[in-house]
Image: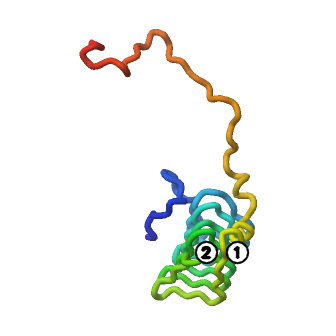
Amino acid sequence: MFGNNNKDSFNGSAPTYVGKGMRIEGKIWGMRPIWIDGEVKGTIDIGSEVIIGEPAKIDATIRASTIKVNGFVEGELFASGKIEIMSKGRVHGNVTNLAGCLIIHDGGIVEGQCSIANEEKMKSLMPQQFPKLLPEKSTTPPKVIKAPENIKDITSKSPEESA
C-alpha cells in the first residue's frame, strides 16, 4: 500500500501489526516497524517506521524514524527522517521533522503547526531508549566449531577430484 523503499526497515521481518478492532492504551516502543489499523491512545516511540492505516484512530504522540499516515492522528508527530501524509491521512496536531522531509499528498490534511528542526535538535526530541535496544557489541571472540574428522573438505576440490 505504501511501498517498501525505507532503508531503515528491517529486512526480512514483518512489522508488528495492530489490527482493526484492536485498542491499545499506554506506551508502545521498540525498534521494529509497526503498522496500525486499530486504535491507540498514549505514546508511540519506534526506532524505525510507523504506518497508520486508513481505518486507524490514533490519539498519541508519535516519535519515530519514519511516519506514514493514511488514517486519523490526533497528537504530535516527531520524525528523525520522513513524515508522509497520504491522500486519506488526517493529522490534528503539530508536526516536527528535518527540512525537506515532510510530504503531504493530494487530499492529506495537517491541522497544526509544521516545524523544522536540525539534526541535533531532532536527537534531543527523540526517545533516549533507542540506543539501549540495540544489541551490545561482544568483547569475547566468537566460538569456532570444527567439523568432525570423518567429514571431507569438499570446498577446495573440483568435482573430478572428489570422485
Q: Which residue is mark 2?
A: 98
State the residue in front, 92 or 100: 100
- Distance (Cα) linking label 1 and label 2: 17 Å
User: What coloring was used for the rendering?
Assistant: rainbow
Whether residue 24 is visible, yes or no, is no
Identified at 51% across, 86% down, the residue is: 108
Quarter of the image where the N terminus is located: bottom left
Q: Residue furthest left?
A: 160
Mark 2 Cα shell of 10 Å, populated few (<14), some (14-19), many (≥20): some
- Place of residue 149 in the rendered image (x, y in percent of width and height, measured from the top left): 48, 10
- Place of residue 51 in the rendered image (x, y in percent of width and height, measured from the top left): 55, 69
State the residue in front, 64 or 81: 81
Identified at 67% across, 50% down, the residue is: 134
Identified at 65% across, 76% down, the residue is: 77
Three-letter code for the amino acid on which mark 1 is drawn? Thr
Mark 1 Cα shell of 10 Å, populated few (<14), some (14-19), many (≥20): some
SS type, badge 1:
strand
* In the rendered image, the vertical position of residue 81 relative to residue 110, given as above or below: above
SS type, badge 2:
loop
Q: Which residue is mark 1?
A: 61
Q: Earlier in the sequence, mark 1 or mark 2?
A: 1
Q: Is residue 55 left or right of residue 64?
A: left
State the residue in front, 85 or 37: 85
